[in-house]
Amino acid sequence: MQYAWVNKLASRCPVAYGLGCGGGCGFSGACLDSPGIPVYSIRIMKTEVLSFAGPCLRIAILMGVVLSGVQILQAQTSPNSGSSVSPDKTVSATPQEIKNLVSELGHDEYSKREDATRRLTALGEIVAPYLQDAVKSTDPEVRIRARGIMLKIGAADIDKVDPENFQMVDTLLTPVMSSEHANLVTIVKMGRNAAPSLVRICREGQGAKPIYSMIALTRIADPRSFPALAEMFQDTRINNAMFGYVATIKDPRMLFHLIKAWQQHGENASPELRKQVARMAGTELGDDPKKWMEWYMDKYSDKLK
């Protein structure tokens, strides 16, 4: 049994985006509810009878029910959003819409709070200036949600590492013992494709590999890697070597993530991280990361777009 709207439905299935699910969009049962996945409603004769979410929309057909005028309505989330926090470039919002979403972080209805959290995360770093009051809210849930969004935005898919790519990058790094080694130049030319593997090597590699992976990341300057680079200042194996290399990144979003990492670690933030913030900011504002973030938002908030 098949309906004319199945093709439209299939076009919105994650399978069409290469994610796969093993079942397609057939009539083989209902998917489990999954946070962060687009929500679909089935309306029959303009009456909503079912609402659910899942990585691949499957529909349970009830015996004896004649479906007529079925319309699939997708909520305002990206069809391939999944669990990743990478901003969807097709998602946009006006400043007033962003302010409304921030206010809904404290809505009485749980579903409203969840929806606002998902949508703000999907919008990415553009929402950061609007969360400055929310992260200090007297409402514990608003504060936790706002801080959670601030920590997620910008991280993107840097943790999704292709095994073959990782093997190639790791092999190229094995003989590298100089910042000008030909293999390191080759890795840098790989650009964004090498970034996820380099981040993993920085975190898990042995010997000199983490240091040269860090150097490659600063030369590639992929914004997806900025949160990871900022976090590396807490790693005593490599943070002493990072100072000059990270300073070569001209994208002001790097400074944003350095300050954000300082906020996250608070008093436990490494001296190297604090020095890096002051060096890249070109000023000195003391030991309160909140003051640094306020300064950054006044100076660079438009650069987060």
Image (spheres, grey):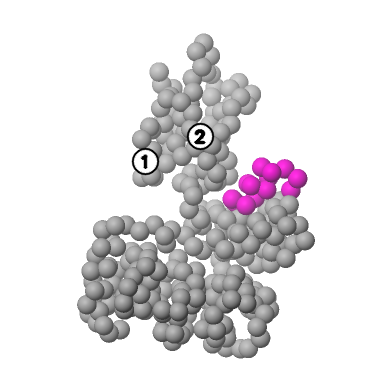
Rendered image quadrant of residue 265: bottom right
Going by the picture, which residue comes out furthest to the top?
64
118 in magenta: yes
Q: Is residue 105 above or below residue 12?
A: below
Going by the picture, which residue comes out furthest to the right?
138
175 in magenta: no
> In this image, 107 relative to 229: left or right?
right
Q: Is residue 223 above or below residue 57?
A: below
> In this image, 131 relative to 255: left or right?
right
Q: Are marks 2 and 1 in contact (CB under 8 Å)?
A: no
Residue 21 coordinates in the image, percent (x, y): 38, 38
- Nearer the observer, 190 or 43: 190
Front of the two marks 2 and 1: 2
Name the residue: 62% across, 77% down.
267
Name the residue: 72% across, 65% down.
136
Rendered image quadrant of residue 239: bottom left
User: Does dot 1 land on a helix, a strand or a loop?
Assistant: loop
| Highlighted magenta segment, given as a residue range | 107-119
- Nearer the observer, 26 or 66: 26
Residue 55 coordinates in the image, percent (x, y): 46, 39
Q: Amino acid at mark 2?
A: Leu
Q: Is residue 68 above or below residue 155?
A: above
Rendered image quadrant of residue 126: bottom right
Name the residue: 56% across, 28% down.
42
User: Does dot 2 land on a helix, a strand or a loop?
Assistant: loop
Q: Amino acid at mark 1?
A: Gly
To which residue does mark 1 refer?
Answer: 20
To which residue does mark 2 refer?
Answer: 32
| Quadrant including the C terminus | bottom right
